[in-house]
């Protein structure tokens, strides 16, 4: 079965939804092109839900979900799915945690059963030893992706810079070493019973399955899982539309080239004005025809690279971030000045119809291309269902983007690109460290 | 309670790799087309015999620079205009070169296919390589090389190649060139490389997606009508190792919290008759999450976030390498475990459990790899680059399935060479050096990163 009626404008993926009595929200999207099916679970919990002193816990907990459950051995989840010929993983973000498998379609039951077993009965499999090992694994993940990687601290430094102290988005997603050390089995039990409940989750299935059979399997495996007792509300998330002042932080780090991240508060993901911000971001920094690439990389040649993106946060505020890496001969002050000048120019003159058309054309193609993979369809269904209870929004994205005009983008820019809404995070190379006579000390051994 | 009964798989549903047409156009270009009409989208991938192995000695980086330079202007449009034109069609032209070939590709909505392909044809048939843009691209590559100095993963990969292959081998030097080689390249070098390699005989155009073969043929024939005739350039494959006995190279990075570790030796070329047993052997050793090396280093010891092994399949013998990043303090124990695992898979037959896990995974995941037009196009490019038979993908799962535990053991013995293992570590020499003074690891050499 094809997913389009021969014309892009009519493209819709089929969607069916239902709830189980325990509150699990299920979305289904059939496509029989290839014998592949994707199972995807979003739990509406992320680093924003962490208690003080437990930064990084939501992500450490995600690791524990691969350590077995009542009827599944340690690491067996991975083995069973790979043995079935499937791919799998999980990921943690500020607002959610997701788990996903793509398997040959005759293995749908296995993927669902594995997800149900760990949603229903994780705790019998949890041990101190497993927690200690995963704590070490996560600490090594932090060393690898944050501490020993140029610009690797960007996410946590930016969160710290742009969110107020008590805001749920302010603290580190990967967590501090101290907080990871402090995490206990009690924390695991409490987090599980509070957040890993069917009424705090969305299950999506996309690809080659029969609706009736999928209904039956979901009911059989997930219905026995009791509803949760509710989760504590997040503290107030809403923030004013602008920072109110200029924010700036300079980080001296083990990097080769200066790099500037400039963030702006922008309308939350899913709001009508989010789409104007998303288009603004593409006008500014998506691909080589974008404003910043044309101007800073191609014409003025002060940058080695330039791009822009949005965080897509659905609560509080979203962030639009400009990311420019300097050429070796460009000093930090010049980098900062030139980017500021580009932002001032945008703020003063706005963007043109043609720039907006280019941006929307690129976004449309990316949207369609991403829907080719069953896993991506399932993930987006889960996302729209989790954030807005409306999985069908997946079919409305192209239209919402097409409705964005230069006028709307310019309204957004004049509201959000002023000097009172710019946060600059600058990385500059640390002074060279002496090699401490290491060469002389080198010892040859046979 | 969730049922404790593990579900059994249902009946397998048939899958076939997309059928494709293979033909030679009147001008000499080879055309592969694979219709896939799930979504209104198509990918065009042009593969040219103009990779790093085709570079003249001393011109390392010219293949990448030439591929990038294609987008910088034609007789009709300059680079900025070209970017605008493609992007207004909702696509961007991407180009590059790897060891074996250069590629130029777009993915575009099918109603824009004609216009985008015409433009693509012009870009690669009549590039002018403006001096200013060539110099800019060189400067961008030099910035990238500088970035690598502070990026442990990339640095470890690059230094591993350098210490693995003899200096005569092209593989010993960075595929996109070094500061010295790129710095010395000129606009004329680009022009010369383009003229000598971008010819009909070494060019294949692959079209995958929502388009019939007839329409694809018409579009490509028109877009490539100016493509110059000519024969392909022969490549050099010198793949001798630099050392025949074990050695350990530390690239000193003061205060590094982790050691970025590479262990391996020269592997084997893609078209080796032992390809399938070696693939299965590597899956068990370090290719899968549930492989011996990952389970040992990550799940048993908690030394790392991940560890894996792989053969880099090139036309010449690419490297076999185990890659991981471990906490500095456990560098030597982690290296010991890697060496043990390499010995172990050579001494005893793998278990049935391990064999079936690797085979079932590789067979089962096969259709999942080809969900997008871009992925199918890349798979077809692999056929072209390595001159694999037309039924390669149809026979793939059967070939995997027929690999036995004996064949895996034989492949491990034939294609893992414990005595020749070279180790490269980007890490803090002050912390790790003394623990690596050990004859089992080989001669120790420390370098400034």
Image: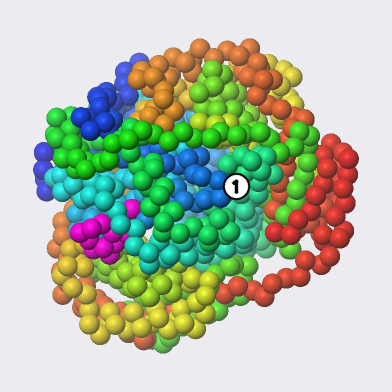
Q: Is residue B244 left or right of residue A27?
A: right
Indicate whether A156 appears above or below A140: below
How dense is the environment of label 1, judged by Cα within 10 Å: few (below 14), some, or many (20 and up)? many
What residue lies at 51% left-to-right and 27% top-to-bottom? B270
The chain letter under disc 1 is: B
Indicate whether A210 appears above or below B91: above
Residue B360 on the magenta span: no
Residue A346 spot, x, y in % from top left: 28, 79
Residue B349 spot, x, y in % from top left: 68, 16
- Picture quarter containing residue A30? top left
Indicate whether B372 appears above or below A139: above
Q: In this rendered view, identify the residue nearer to me: B251 or B285.
A: B251
Q: Could you tell me if residue B91 is visible in this image?
A: yes
Residue A214 spot, x, y in % from top left: 30, 30
Q: Which residues are magenta?
A: B70-81
Q: Secondary structure at mark 1?
A: loop
């Amino acid at each position: 079965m094809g997913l389009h009626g021969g014309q892009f404008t009519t493209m819709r993926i089929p969607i069916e939804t239902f709830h189980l009595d325990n509150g699990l929200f299920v979305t289904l999207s059939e496509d029989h092109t290839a014998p592949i099916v994707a199972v995807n679970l979003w739990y509406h919990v992320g680093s924003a839900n962490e208690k003080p002193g437990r930064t990084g816990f939501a992500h450490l907990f995600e690791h524990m979900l691969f350590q077995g459950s009542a009827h599944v051995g340690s690491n067996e989840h991975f083995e069973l799915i790979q043995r079935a010929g499937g791919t799998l993983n999980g990921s943690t973000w500020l607002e959610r945690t997701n788990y996903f498998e793509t398997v040959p379609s005759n293995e749908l039951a296995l993927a669902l059963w594995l997800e149900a077993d760990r949603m229903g009965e994780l705790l019998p499999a949890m041990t101190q030893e497993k927690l200690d090992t995963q704590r070490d694994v996560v600490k090594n993940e932090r060393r690898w992706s944050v501490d020993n990687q140029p610009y690797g601290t960007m996410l946590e430094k930016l969160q710290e810079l742009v969110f107020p102290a008590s805001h749920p988005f302010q603290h580190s997603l990967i967590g501090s070493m101290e907080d990871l050390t402090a995490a206990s089995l009690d924390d695991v039990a409490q987090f599980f019973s509070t957040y890993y409940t069917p009424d705090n989750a969305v299950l999506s299935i996309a690809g080659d399955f029969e609706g009736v059979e999928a209904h039956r399997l979901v009911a059989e495996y997930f219905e026995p899982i009791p509803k949760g007792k509710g989760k504590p509300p997040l503290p107030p998330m809403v923030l004013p539309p602008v920072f109110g002042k200029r924010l700036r932080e300079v980080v001296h780090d083990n990097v080769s080239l200066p790099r500037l991240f400039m963030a702006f508060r922008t309308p939350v993901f899913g709001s009508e004005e989010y789409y104007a911000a998303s288009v603004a971001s593409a006008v500014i920094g998506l691909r080589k025809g974008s404003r910043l690439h044309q101007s800073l990389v191609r014409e003025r040649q002060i940058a080695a690279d330039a791009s822009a993106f949005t965080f897509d946060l659905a609560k509080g505020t979203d962030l639009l971030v400009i990311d420019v890496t300097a050429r070796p001969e460009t000093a930090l002050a010049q980098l900062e000045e030139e980017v500021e000048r580009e932002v001032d120019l945008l703020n003063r003159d706005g963007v043109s119809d043609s720039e907006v058309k280019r941006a929307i054309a690129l976004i449309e193609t990316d949207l369609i291309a991403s829907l080719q993979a069953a896993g991506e369809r399932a993930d987006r269904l889960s996302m729209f269902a989790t954030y807005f209870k409306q999985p069908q929004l997946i079919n409305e994205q192209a239209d919402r983007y097409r409705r964005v005009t230069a006028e709307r983008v310019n309204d957004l820019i004049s509201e959000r690109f002023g000097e009172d809404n710019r946060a600059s995070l600058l990385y500059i190379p640390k002074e060279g460290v002496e090699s401490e006579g290491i060469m002389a000390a080198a010892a040859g051994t046979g | 309670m969730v049922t404790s009964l593990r579900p059994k798989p249902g009946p397998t549903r048939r899958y076939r790799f997309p059928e494709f047409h293979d033909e030679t156009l009147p001008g000499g270009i080879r055309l592969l087309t694979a219709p896939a009409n799930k979504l209104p989208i198509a990918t065009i991938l042009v593969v040219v015999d103009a990779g790093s192995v085709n570079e003249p000695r001393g011109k390392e980086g010219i293949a990448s620079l030439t591929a990038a330079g294609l987008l910088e202007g034609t007789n009709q449009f300059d680079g900025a205009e070209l970017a605008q034109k493609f992007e207004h069609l909702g696509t961007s032209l991407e180009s590059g070169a790897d060891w074996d070939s250069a590629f130029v590709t777009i993915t575009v909505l099918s109603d824009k296919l004609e216009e985008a392909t015409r433009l693509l044809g012009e870009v690669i048939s009549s590039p002018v390589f403006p001096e200013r843009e060539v110099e800019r691209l060189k400067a961008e590559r030099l910035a990238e090389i500088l970035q690598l100095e502070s990026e442990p993963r990339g640095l470890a990969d690059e230094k591993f190649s350098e210490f693995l292959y003899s200096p005569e081998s092209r593989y010993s030097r960075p595929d996109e060139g070094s500061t010295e080689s790129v710095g010395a390249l000129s606009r004329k070098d680009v022009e010369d490389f383009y003229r000598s390699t971008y010819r009909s005989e070494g060019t294949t155009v692959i079209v995958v997606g929502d388009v019939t073969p007839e329409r694809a043929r018409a579009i490509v024939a028109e877009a490539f009508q100016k493509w110059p005739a000519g024969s392909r350039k022969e490549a050099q494959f010198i793949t001798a190792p630099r050392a025949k006995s074990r050695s350990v190279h530390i690239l000193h990075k003061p205060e590094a919290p982790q050691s970025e570790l590479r262990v391996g030796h020269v592997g084997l070329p893609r078209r080796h008759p032992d390809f399938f047993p070696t693939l299965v052997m590597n899956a068990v050793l370090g290719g899968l999450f549930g492989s011996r090396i990952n389970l040992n280093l990550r799940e048993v010891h908690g030394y790392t976030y991940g560890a894996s092994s792989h053969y880099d399949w090139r036309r010449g013998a690419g490297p076999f390498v185990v890659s991981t990043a471990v906490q500095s303090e456990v560098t030597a124990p982690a290296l010991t475990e890697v060496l043990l695992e390499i010995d172990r898979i050579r001494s005893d037959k793998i278990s049935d459990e391990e064999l079936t896990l690797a085979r079932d995974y590789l067979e089962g995941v096969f259709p999942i790899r080809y969900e997008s037009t871009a992925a199918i196009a890349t798979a077809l490019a692999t056929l072209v680059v390595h001159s694999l038979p037309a039924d390669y993908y149809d026979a793939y799962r059967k070939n995997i399935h027929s690999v036995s535990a004996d064949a895996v053991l034989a492949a491990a013995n034939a294609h893992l060479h414990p005595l020749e293992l070279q180790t490269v570590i980007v890490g803090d020499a002050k912390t790790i050096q003394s623990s690596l003074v050990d004859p089992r690891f080989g001669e120790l050499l420390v370098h400034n990163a």
